[in-house]
C-alpha cells in the first residue's frame, strides 16, 4: 500500500509541475512540448514497469505462495491489497476512473460476474488446456479453482447411521440447533450455498424458498458471522454438521481431525474462484503475465498439492483425497441469476430470518 501511495504522490507532484508551467503564457509552447515529452516518458515507463498490483481475498498461505513463486519466476514485483471480496470489488468500482488495481485474483465467479463491466477481455495463453466450464462466455473473467460446496460433520457427534446424505437431511429435527452456517450477507461461500440449495429444490417455483424456511427454522437462531467459523466449530465439536467449502473441509480430514465430508445427493455447486484483469489498468502486460501464471500447470499443481485447491486445467490432478469433478453430482447453477438477482435473493433471505 505504501508503494501505491508513493506512486500517487509522484503523479500528484508531476501534475503540480505541469500546472505551474501552464500558468506562464511566455513559456506555453515550451510547456506543451515538455508535457508531451513527459506523457511519452510516462507511457514508456508504464510499458517497462516491473510491478503489478493485485487485489485478492485469498487466504494468506496460498496467496503468499503464489506471489512468491511468480516474483521469483518473472522478476515482476507484486503489490498485494488483501481484503474481503465485496470490499475489493467495491474499491475497483470506485477507482474505475483511474484504476489502482491491475488484477483481481480470487472471489467467487458469481461475484466477479456482477462487476464484470470493470474487467477487460483476455484469453489466457493455455486456454485450450482449461475446462471451458470455468471460462466466462464474454471473456471477462476466468475461473482458477472450482469450489464444490459440501456438508462437513463431526464423527464424534454424528453416528454412522445419522450421517446426512444431502441438503434435505438438514431439516431433520435431530440436527436442530446443531448446524453451522454463516450469514450469506457476510460470507460469499454461504451465499453460493444458499443459491445452490434454492436451485436444488426449485428456485423458480417457490419450492426452494419453502425448503429454506424449514432450514432456517432448524438453525434455531444460530447463524455464524463468517465462513471460517463453520469448519472450525464443527471440528471443535460445537456443531454437529456444517455447510462449507470442500477445500476447507479436506484440510481437516488430511490433518487427521474426526470429521467427514458429504457431497449432497441432490447435487452441489462448484462455482470457481476467478481471476480477471481490471479495465484500464496501468500494468496490463504484467497483469496478463500474472494471470497466465496463475492458470499455468505449474501454479495449478502447486495449489492442489500444497493447499488442497482444485485446478481448472484438464491436465492436472485434483488434491489427494477428493473425487474427480465428473464423479460429483452438480446442480445447474445459474451464474447470471445468482449475480444479477443477489439483492432480491438477500431481501427474501432477510424476510425468512425475520419470520
Image (cartoon, rainbow, N blue to C red):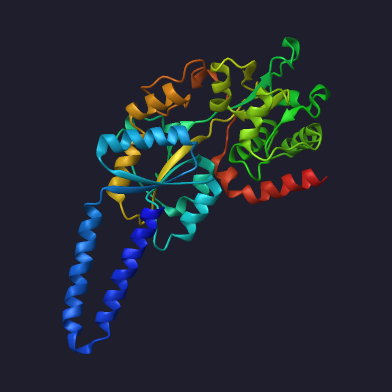
Foreground residue, 78 or 286? 78
Side of 52 relative to 26 (left or right): right
Residue drawn at x 80%, y 24% is 172
Is residue 111 visible in the rendered image? The answer is yes
Residue 191 location, quadrant: top right
Side of 14 relative to 99 (left or right): left
**For residue 125, above or below residue 91:** above
Seen as rendered, the residue at the extreme top is: 160
| Relative image position of residue 304 (x, y in whole percent) | 43, 24
Residue 153 location, quadrant: top right
Quadrant position of the C terminus in the picture: top right
Residue drawn at x 28%, y 35% is 72
Foreground residue, 83 or 130? 83
| Relative image position of residue 318 (x, y in whole percent) | 45, 20
Foreground residue, 121 or 54? 54
Seen as rendered, the residue at the extreme bottom is: 26
Side of 113 relative to 236 (left or right): left
| Relative image position of residue 271 (x, y in whole percent) | 53, 34
**For residue 190, above or below residue 316:** below
Side of 102 relative to 192 (left or right): left
Is residue 124 visible in the rendered image? The answer is no
Residue 68 location, quadrant: top left
| Relative image position of residue 268 (x, y in whole percent) | 60, 27
Residue drawn at x 65%, y 24% is 151
Foreground residue, 187 or 171? 187
Amino acid at each position: 500500500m505504501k508503494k501505491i501511495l508513493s506512486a500517487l504522490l509522484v503523479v500528484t507532484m508531476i501534475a503540480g509541475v505541469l500546472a505551474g508551467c501552464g500558468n506562464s503564457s511566455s513559456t506555453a509552447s515550451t510547456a506543451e512540448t515538455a508535457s508531451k515529452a513527459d506523457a511519452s516518458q510516462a507511457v514508456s515507463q508504464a510499458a517497462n514497469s516491473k510491478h503489478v498490483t493485485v487485489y485478492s481475498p485469498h487466504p494468506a498461505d496460498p496467496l503468499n505462495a503464489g506471489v512468491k513463486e511468480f516474483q521469483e519466476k518473472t522478476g515482476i514485483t507484486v503489490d498485494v491489497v488483501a481484503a474481503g471480496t465485496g470490499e475489493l470489488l467495491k474499491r475497483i468500482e470506485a477507482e474505475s476512473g483511474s484504476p489502482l488495481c491491475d488484477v483481481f485474483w480470487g472471489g467467487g465467479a458469481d461475484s466477479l460476474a456482477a462487476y464484470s463491466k470493470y474487467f477487460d477481455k483476455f484469453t489466457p495463453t493455455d486456454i485450450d488446456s482449461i475446462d471451458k466450464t470455468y471460462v466466462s462466455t464474454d471473456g471477462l473473467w476466468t475461473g482458477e479453482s472450482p469450489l464444490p460446496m459440501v456438508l462437513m460433520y463431526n464423527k464424534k457427534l454424528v453416528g454412522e447411521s445419522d450421517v446426512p446424505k444431502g441438503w434435505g437431511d438438514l431439516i431433520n429435527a435431530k440436527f436442530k440447533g446443531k448446524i453451522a452456517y454463516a450469514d450469506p450477507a457476510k460470507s460469499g461461500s454461504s451465499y453460493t450455498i444458499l443459491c445452490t440449495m434454492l436451485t436444488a429444490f426449485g428456485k423458480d417455483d417457490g419450492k426452494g424458498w419453502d425448503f429454506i424456511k424449514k432450514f432456517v427454522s432448524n438453525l434455531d437462531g444460530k447463524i455464524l458471522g463468517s465462513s471460517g467459523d463453520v469448519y472450525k466449530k464443527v471440528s471443535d465439536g460445537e456443531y454437529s454438521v456444517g455447510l462449507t467449502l470442500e477445500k476447507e473441509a479436506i484440510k481437516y480430514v488430511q490433518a487427521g481431525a474426526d470429521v467427514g465430508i458429504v457431497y449432497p445427493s441432490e447435487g452441489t455447486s462448484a462455482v470457481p474462484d476467478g481471476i480477471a484483469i481490471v479495465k484500464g489498468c496501468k500494468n496490463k502486460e504484467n497483469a496478463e503475465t500474472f494471470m497466465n501464471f496463475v492458470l499455468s500447470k505449474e501454479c495449478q499443481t502447486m495449489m492442489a498439492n500444497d493447499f488442497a485447491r482444485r485446478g481448472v486445467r484438464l491436465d492436472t490432478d485434483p488434491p489427494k483425497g477428493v473425487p474427480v469433478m465428473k464423479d460429483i453430482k452438480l446442480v445447474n447453477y445459474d451464474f447470471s441469476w445468482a449475480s444479477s438477482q443477489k439483492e432480491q435473493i438477500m431481501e427474501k433471505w432477510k424476510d425468512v430470518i425475520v419470520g
